[in-house]
Image: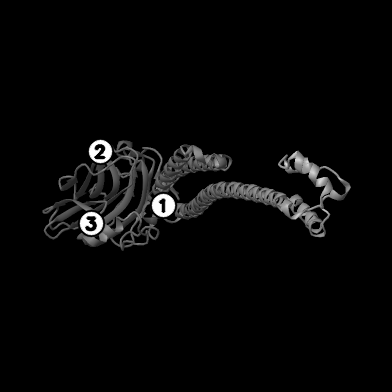
């Protein structure tokens, strides 16, 4: 690059002093001029003074060649610089494209990580809430668990779709394949974790459903089998000599037969003075004997909790039946003007025998299942109160003034027992 400039620097002093390239020694540099100086001129040059005025055209040619050579060098350098610049621009674009791919993959990883952390926080919080609800508010468990299961299914579906979308990513993004494989494995692991959580939630749902007690009640009566020896005796808080009443209770019957006793009040004269019964899928109320009957059809389901209420007033003999807060039957003229006699016996899950001896009880009418929230009032409750007590997510702190759940003396016999 600096050769022509150096030659020019050497030639100029020699040219100005009259001694150009050793002409005074008679040396022949004809080849340096590419044979443009003829032989005749070479002979004449030996006798003439070097660098005569008429030979200046030769040096003009020399300088022109040097200038042309310099220009060619500059052009080659400029071309090389342009090529290098174009190549650098191409490399810069590729690097920018590659950086964009890495940013995209990194953003996807960060998004999936945030989703996973958010899901883990939600699931951990929900599991803590479910553990507390299993003891205090069992009614809330089923709804919460269903929401969690649906949420996990939706998230699993979304992540599966994301994986499918990622697997069809354009081929020109091959530079990010390694990071993409890592992201795909992370998504697969997240889906597997969600499936395990879904299985655990389903198992927990079955366990809590078995232990579930409605309306926030903390304990229940268990009647493990149908037996004449299994029953519960209740001592009321006031006299049973009543002209009106309301009985409410929660019951989960294992199997209802033609006659299955929930609540029975009897005296020596009439062992079936007052009864609240199940008959297959029907609910029945009798007052003053079986001739005074009120019945609600197709309201009972075996193996499911139900809230059953019966209300009666001797005035006009109005009797009503309520199931899960809804009025199922309303009949006037039932034992109109009748007054319940006092000094009787209240049994749950069984009826008093006519002999009054426990061993003479009938096992075919015995209740089997669970019962809780048994209350009795000495008046007819209004519809709003009954609907409130029938709320599965409510509170088990409403107690009757004749029988109050958790307050009155309720004693299991035989194999009946309290559970929570």
Q: Which of marks 1 and 3 is nearer the N terminus?
A: 1
The residue nearer to you, when weighing 105 against 51, is: 51
Q: What element carries label 1?
A: loop
Front of the two marks 1 and 3: 1
Residue under the point 37% across and 45% down: 370
Tell which of 380 and 107 is nearer to you: 107
Q: Can you tell which of label 3 and label 2 is closer to the viewer?
A: 2
Q: Residue 138 carries which label?
A: 1
Q: Mark 3 points at which residue?
A: 341
Residue placed most toward the observer, 6 or 110: 6
Quarter location, residue 336: bottom left
Q: Which secondary structure lies at badge 2?
A: loop
Q: Earlier in the sequence, mark 3 or mark 2?
A: 2
Find out whether the residues at labels 1 and 3 contact each other: C-beta distance under 8 Å: no
- Tell me: residue 399, above or below residue 420: below
Q: Mark 2 = which residue? A: 280
């Amino acid at each position: 690059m600096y050769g022509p400039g150096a030659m020019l620097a050497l030639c100029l002093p020699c040219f100005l002093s009259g001694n150009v390239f050793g002409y005074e020694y008679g040396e022949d540099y004809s080849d340096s001029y590419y044979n443009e100086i003829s032989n005749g001129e070479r002979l004449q040059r030996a006798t003439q003074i070097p660098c005569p005025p008429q030979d200046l055209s030769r040096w003009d040619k020399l300088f022109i060649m040097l200038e042309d050579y310099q220009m060619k060098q500059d052009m080659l350098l400029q071309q090389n610089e342009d090529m290098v610049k174009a190549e650098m621009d191409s490399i810069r674009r590729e690097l920018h494209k590659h950086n964009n791919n890495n940013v995209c993959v990194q953003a996807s990883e960060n998004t999936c990580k945030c989703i996973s952390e958010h899901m883990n926080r939600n699931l951990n919080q929900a599991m803590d809430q479910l553990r507390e609800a299993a003891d205090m508010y069992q009614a809330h468990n089923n709804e919460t668990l269903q929401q969690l299961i649906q949420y996990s299914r939706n998230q699993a579906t979304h992540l599966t779709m994301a994986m499918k979308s990622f697997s069809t990513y354009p081929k020109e993004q091959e530079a990010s394949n390694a990071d993409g494989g890592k992201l795909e494995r992370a998504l697969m692991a997240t889906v597997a974790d969600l499936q395990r959580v879904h299985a655990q939630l389903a198992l927990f749902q079955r366990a809590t459903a078995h232990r579930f007690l409605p309306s926030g009640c903390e304990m229940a009566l268990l009647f493990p089998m149908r037996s004449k020896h299994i029953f519960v005796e209740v001592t009321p808080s006031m006299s049973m000599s009543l002209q009106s009443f309301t009985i409410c209770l929660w019951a989960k019957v294992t199997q209802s037969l033609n006659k299955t006793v929930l609540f029975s009040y009897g005296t020596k004269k009439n062992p079936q003075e007052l009864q609240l019964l199940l008959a297959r899928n029907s609910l029945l109320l009798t007052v003053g004997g079986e001739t005074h009957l009120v019945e609600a059809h197709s309201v009972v389901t075996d193996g499911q909790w139900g809230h059953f209420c019966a209300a009666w007033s001797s005035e006009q003999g109005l009797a009503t039946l309520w199931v899960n807060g809804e009025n199922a039957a309303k009949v006037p003229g039932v034992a109109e003007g009748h007054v319940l006699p006092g000094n009787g016996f209240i049994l749950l899950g069984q009826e008093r025998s006519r002999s009054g001896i426990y061993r003479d009880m009938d096992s075919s009418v015995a209740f089997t299942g669970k019962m809780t929230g048994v209350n009795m009032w000495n008046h007819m409750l209004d519809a709003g109160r009954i609907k409130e007590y029938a709320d599965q997510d409510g509170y088990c702190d409403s107690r009757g003034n004749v029988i109050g759940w958790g307050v009155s003396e309720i004693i299991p016999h035989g194999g009946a027992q309290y559970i929570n």
